[in-house]
Image: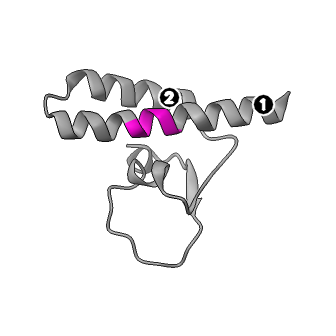
Amino acid sequence: FFRLAGKTIGSCGTQAKCYQNAPIACLTCPYFEPLIDAPWDKLLDYLIDDQAKEQTLRIKEINLQAIKAVKDIITLIDSEKN
């Protein structure tokens, strides 16, 4: 979503080739390096909207992990700013 919209949310901390669904799969990867000034609120809104539309239970579980990861990133950024 954000790659297609021209917005960067972070980068990969490795040089490995990854064939996962970037950037959503990146959110739960231990090598992901999130950017502080990325549009996290917009990504969270997108993931929540996508979650509401999804019918497949397994995909809903994956989306929940991504939503939690974004919320954790937002919390971390907010705590660093304060």
Q: Quadrant of residue 12?
A: bottom right
55 and 9: which is toward the camera:
55
Query: Is 29 drawn above or below residue 52 in the view shown?
Result: below
Q: Quadrant of residue 20?
A: bottom left
Residue segment shown in magenta? 65-69
Instruction: Name the main secondary structure of what is drawn in magenta.
Output: helix
Q: Amino acid at mark 2?
A: Lys
- Secondary structure of the residue carrying tag 1 is helix
Q: Residue at x 42, y 39 (%)?
A: 66
Q: Amino acid at mark 1?
A: Ser
Query: From this viewpoint, which residue is outermost toward the left?
Result: 55
Q: Which residue is mark 1?
A: 79
Q: Crowding at label 2, few (<14), some or many (≥20) Cα neighbours within 10 Å?
A: few
Q: Which residue is mark 2?
A: 42
Q: Crowding at label 1, few (<14), some or many (≥20) Cα neighbours within 10 Å?
A: few
38 and 4: which is toward the camera:
38
Residue 72, percent from left and from top: 59, 35
Residue 61, percent from left and from top: 29, 36
- Secondary structure of the residue carrying tag 2 is helix
Instruction: Decide if residue 26 is on the left or right side of residue 71.
Output: left
Q: Is residue 39 visible?
A: no
Q: How far is the residue under mark 2 from the one under mark 1?
A: 19 Å
